[in-house]
């Protein structure tokens, strides 16, 4: 989208909200009716026997980055007790599943993705007892808990690696070790592979007098999955957490799990002219990404989870992280997992409008294996925030898109508020990916800007911590953009998000069909639901010009619709929730979206 790059600050929701503070009881009543109708519809639906939808199909999944969510003990870093203290927030938003990025013991070289003890909680985040309480408290609120499972690598401080350094015993081949090769009498790594964060991925170890392979930072040695003991021990890690009542896993960096058995093979050049020789994208990763051997290991995890499912009948869930197109990612369905679809994050150009979004979405639907369920996401702790990529004015409409499509949506914390990124100087940058690229290019890669503390209220440090120094600075805009302020305003991003999350439970949005309606350079629209479930028209202006269209033809096939959700609530009285709107000539501003009941 073009609108992506300009910020129409005069139209930002907060400012609009300031003008219109008076709460309308009518609105609340209408909302209540909509919610009750949705619940009623769902109960009818369930009664007719459509109860096969697992929880991970119906719920939004909310990603918590524990360092940045809520600090309970005043050290400036979020923790598990902090999360427990905010569980009511998910009930407010009608979110039924949370995914926690790593909270395990870690030297924090990659902020918790370098685990030194898989079966304990880092003291920064709390204790195992805190984790157990978190699960108990979540479940008592009907919220499922998904944890991050990091199988590819671990911290170099982990006892397995420390043992492996000795070069003897059980752990000798737990990692990829190599003497390297000699070239003109000089010792060199065995191949030309590159690290994902760019630069070297083989590191010489003096103690063992060999190189080890690390796909990420040098303190994250890769495990060797060709060793059956590694597979078995990691299955036991999974069991440990299943025993504690975990409902699902998000698998980190799955594509890197295996490397070609013969490590003396270089990877070919990608021939991308814009990429320097040390950058990961300089090579095509035929020996280090998505090798077929991954399948059996994932199937093994699924089997472990099925053991638990058999015990209590509760469906469990594996979602895997990879950024590849359908031809590659869809294989993971066969392995028993659901792949993240990052097409709405990675693939879209800045001037992408309705046509281009439809293409990206169709790419998922048209390629989906029969009977499988899609998984859409708009961002995470590794990518730029929605407000940065598509513009602040597009946050609501992007949430509307994510939550009304067919497929499980994942929301990265803060996107429900339309949080903006922070600016961090190179000197203050903490993320190793950013640091690797130096002062000139760090802003392209650093993940610090999207990891700033969640903005809870207008008090000091946005109510995130009682410390004067949170681990990353709070966004200076927190006084107007925070949970407390947005809760009070009916047309805030937060309350629009809440309405969307609630509406999503209506059977119409679980129906397998998404029927595209008017689609052009600006507009993306579709109809959800059938005569049985009730039908909704969702229309969004994802372009940069106002757009007027006639929606009366198929698939809407209706003269008018009643407004259920409007991303720019109450800007224009004619679009107020509950109003009936003619479909023959409907004008939407850029960044505006409507859900209409047909
Ligand atoms: C995944 C994580 C990322 C981490 C990397 C290494 O891509 O999402 O945050 O740095 O794996 O564990
Ligand atoms: Mg690996």
Image (tube, helix red, strand yellow):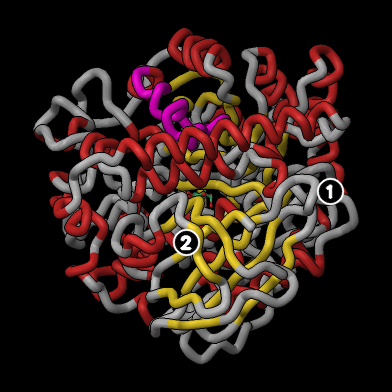
Please state, as top left, top right, bottom left or bottom right, where the C terminus lies in the image: bottom right
Residue 121: horizontal and vertical position, in percent?
46, 20
SS at mark 2 in the image: helix
**Quarter holding residue 490:** top left
Is 101 one of the magenta-colored residues? yes
Crowding at label 1, few (<14), some or many (≥20) Cα neighbours within 10 Å? some
**Label 1 lies in ligand 2 vicinity (Cβ under 8 Å):** no
Please state, as top left, top right, bottom left or bottom right, where the N terminus lies in the image: bottom left
SS at mark 1 in the image: helix
Q: Which residue is at 29% across, 68% downward? A: 443
- What's the magenta region? 85-103
Residue 480: horizontal and vertical position, in percent?
16, 47
429 or 575, nearer to the observer: 575
527 or 307, nearer to the observer: 527
**Quarter holding residue 74:** top left
Q: Which residue is at 40% across, 18% downward? A: 84
Q: Which residue is at 59% across, 42% downward? A: 153
**Res 398 label:** 2
Viewed as shown, does residue 393 lie left or right of 532? left
Residue 468: horizontal and vertical position, in percent?
9, 32
Is 196 one of the magenta-colored residues? no
Judging by the rendered image, the residue that carries numbered circle 1 is: 295
Vertical order, 75 against 354 (above or below): above
Tell me how far mark 2 sits from mark 1, CA to CA.
33 Å
């Amino acid at each position: 989208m073009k609108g992506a790059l300009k910020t129409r600050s005069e139209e930002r929701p907060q400012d609009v909200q300031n003008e219109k503070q008076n709460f309308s009881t009518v609105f609340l009543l209408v909302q209540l009716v909509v919610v009750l109708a949705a619940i009623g519809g769902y109960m009818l639906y369930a009664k007719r026997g459509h109860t096969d939808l697992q929880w991970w199909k119906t719920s939004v999944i909310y990603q918590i980055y524990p360092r940045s969510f809520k600090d309970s003990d005043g050290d400036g870093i979020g923790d598990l007790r902090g999360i427990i203290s905010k569980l009511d927030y998910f009930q407010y938003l009608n979110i039924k599943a949370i995914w926690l990025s790593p909270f395990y013991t870690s030297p924090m070289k990659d902020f918790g993705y370098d685990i030194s003890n898989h079966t304990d909680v880092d003291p920064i985040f709390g204790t195992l007892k805190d984790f157990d309480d978190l699960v108990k408290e979540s479940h008592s609120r009907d919220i499922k808990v998904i944890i991050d499972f990091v199988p590819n690598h671990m911290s170099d401080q982990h006892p397995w690696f420390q043992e492996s350094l000795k070069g003897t015993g059980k752990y000798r081949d737990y990692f990829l070790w190599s003497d390297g090769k000699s070239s003109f009498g000089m010792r060199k790594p065995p191949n030309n592979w590159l690290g994902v964060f760019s630069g070297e991925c083989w590191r010489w170890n003096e103690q063992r007098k060999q190189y080890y392979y690390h796909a990420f930072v040098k303190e994250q040695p890769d495990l060797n999955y060709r060793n059956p003991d590694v597979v078995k021990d990691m299955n036991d890690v999974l069991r440990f957490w299943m025993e504690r009542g975990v409902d699902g896993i998000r698998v980190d960096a799955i594509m890197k799990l295996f490397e070609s058995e013969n490590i003396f093979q270089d990877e070919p050049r990608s021939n991308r002219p814009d990429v320097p020789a040390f950058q990961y994208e300089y090579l095509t990763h035929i020996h280090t990404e998505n090798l077929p051997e991954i399948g059996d290991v994932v199937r093994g995890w699924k089997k472990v989870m099925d053991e638990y499912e058999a015990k209590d009948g509760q469906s469990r869930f594996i979602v895997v992280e990879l950024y590849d197109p359908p031809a590659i990612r869809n294989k993971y369905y066969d392995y028993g997992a659901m792949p993240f679809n990052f097409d709405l994050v990675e693939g879209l150009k800045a001037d992408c409008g309705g046509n281009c979004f439809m293409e990206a979405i169709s790419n998922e639907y048209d390629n989906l294996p029969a009977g499988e369920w899609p998984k859409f996401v708009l961002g995470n702790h590794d990518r730029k925030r929605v407000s940065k990529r598509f513009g602040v004015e597009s946050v609501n409409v992007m949430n509307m898109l994510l939550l009304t499509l067919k497929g499980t949506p994942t929301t990265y914390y803060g996107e429900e508020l339309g949080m903006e990124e922070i600016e961090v100087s190179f000197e203050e940058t903490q993320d190793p990916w950013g640091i690797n690229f130096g002062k000139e290019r760090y802003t392209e890669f650093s993940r610090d800007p999207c990891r700033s503390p969640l903005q809870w209220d207008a008090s000091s440090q946005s109510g995130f911590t009682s410390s004067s120094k949170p681990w990353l600075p709070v966004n200076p805009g927190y006084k107007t953009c925070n949970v407390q302020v947005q809760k009070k305003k009916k047309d805030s991003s937060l309350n629009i998000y809440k309405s969307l999350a609630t509406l999503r439970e209506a059977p119409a949005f679980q129906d397998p069909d998404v029927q595209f309606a008017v689609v052009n350079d600006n507009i993306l629209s579709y109809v959800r639901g059938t005569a049985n479930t009730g039908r909704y028209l969702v229309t969004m202006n994802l372009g940069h010009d106002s757009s007027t269209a006639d929606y009366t033809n198929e698939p809407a096939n209706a003269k008018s619709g009643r407004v259920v959700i409007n991303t720019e609530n109450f800007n224009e009285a004619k679009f107020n929730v509950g109003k009936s709107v003619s479909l023959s000539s409907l004008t939407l501003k850029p960044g505006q979206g409507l859900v209409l009941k047909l």
